Image (cartoon, rainbow, N blue to C red):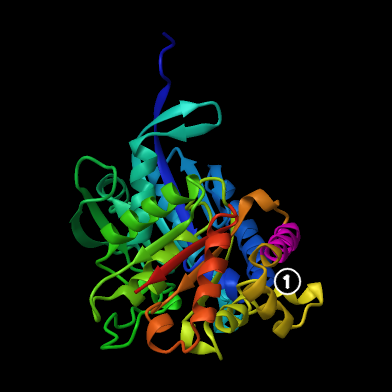
Amino acid sequence: MDRVQRRMAAILVADVVGYSRLIGRDEEGTLATLRAYRLIIDRLIVHHEGRVFGSAGDSVIAEFASPVEALRCATEIQLEIDRQNADLPEPGRLRFRIGINLGDVVVEGDNLMGDGVNVAARLEPLSRPGGICVSEAIYAQARDRLSLDFIDLGEHKVKNIARPVHVYRVPLASEEQVRSPFRGLDVFEFENADLFFGRARAIAACTERLEQLAANGKAFLLIYGMSGSGKSSLLRAGLMPSITRPGAVVGISLWRRCLIRPSEGPDAVASLTAGLLREGALPELLALELPAAELTQLCRSAPDRALTLIRQALGKAATAAGSVLSQIRLLIAIDQTEELFTTEKEPASREALVRLLAAFAGSGLVWVIATI
């Protein structure tokens, strides 16, 4: 058996905060800004004698021989991105979270693997937008060599790492000010994903189950619970951002999402049609020159023909993003599905929506989540 090649390395993992939300709001603008910021990040990594060995969508993974240079590089990245953001309107700004770890890694060609990399990946989401979190090993090497402050966050149990990880935050001027996570009785929306905590186990369980259902050809998940149990927040700020994050689902690089309540329109099918045409969902349907009223009627009477249009629109979206149809999915979320029975007056409309969602969920291109 060949001997496994190992070495010590400082691993830096950077990821865009709220990337799916930004893409949904302004796909072209976000991608243009990301490309510009990647040039900055790549340049600084090379300047500090690092090497990028992983990149997927909005994330960057790099190695450094020196933990001090890794942290110095991360600091310069955050401060430079902050300066660049100052020239952009708030909705178009990209902020990164960065995690850094020093550890033993397994070398496979140009790639690095193992806990040394995994710990850095788990540190990244613990940092604030525009901020940095480091492991104790990085802290020990850098504390007396860099003019930076460190805030001890204590030990954290992180996913798939056997032992707790001691975490330190590096406070920077680039850090986004923390907003209050308390929303009273208001629902957590998609854009509140970074404030939504405490449901990680439920999100993971629902995501895993939906992936299983999709693999079996019926991508439909129903979330049910008592009124006030937080189903809407779980759906909107938990599941939807988690699933549509690029790279979160193997083989899927691009997501479109549609969120509706059945009572939004004249009837449930019209509500879904209106949702499909919104920005971030499938406005490409408008390019097919089919009026909204005709699309609604098609959804009611001919789900298979409606699905053909969905497939065409997804194909257009994939091509525009430089991807292919097999790597794009549409996520349809129906919140408060009980409205089909409490406010929907026409049984025929209710039945039409069920038939339509069944066709979509079995298409291989559309995932459906409903709460009740």
Amino acid, disc 1: Glu
In the image, residue 270 lies at what x, y percent?
Answer: 59, 83
Crowd rating for badge 1 (residues with CA inside 10 Å; few <14, some 14–19, many 20+)? many
- Rendered position, 313 above or below 248: below
Q: Is residue 88 left or right of residue 213?
A: right
Local SS, label 1: helix
Residue on which the image places disc 1: 284
Of helix, strand and loop, which mostly describes the magenta segment?
Answer: helix
Q: Is residue 369 left or right of residue 46?
A: left
Give 24 or 31, whichever is nearer the viewer. 24
For residue 136, above or below residue 347: above
Residue found at x 37% / y 67%: 238
Query: Does residue 161 appear in the picture of this structure?
Result: yes
Quarter of the image where the C terminus is located:
bottom left
Q: Which residue is rendered at x = 71% and y = 83% of the image?
A: 292
Residue stretch in magenta: 307-321
Location of residue 195 with respect to 214 vertically, above or below? below
Q: Is residue 36 magenta?
A: no
In the picture as drawn, the residue positioned furthest to the right comes out as 289
- Front residue of this view, candidates 223 and 160: 223
Magenta stretch: includes residue 315: yes
In the figure, 209 relative to 18: above or below? Answer: above
Q: Position of residue 349 (x, y in %)?
A: 54, 80
Question: At x 44% / y 55%, what residue is drawn?
Answer: 72
| Residue 291 image offset from top left, x and y in percent | 76, 83
- The answer, for residue 82, to whether it is visible in the render is no
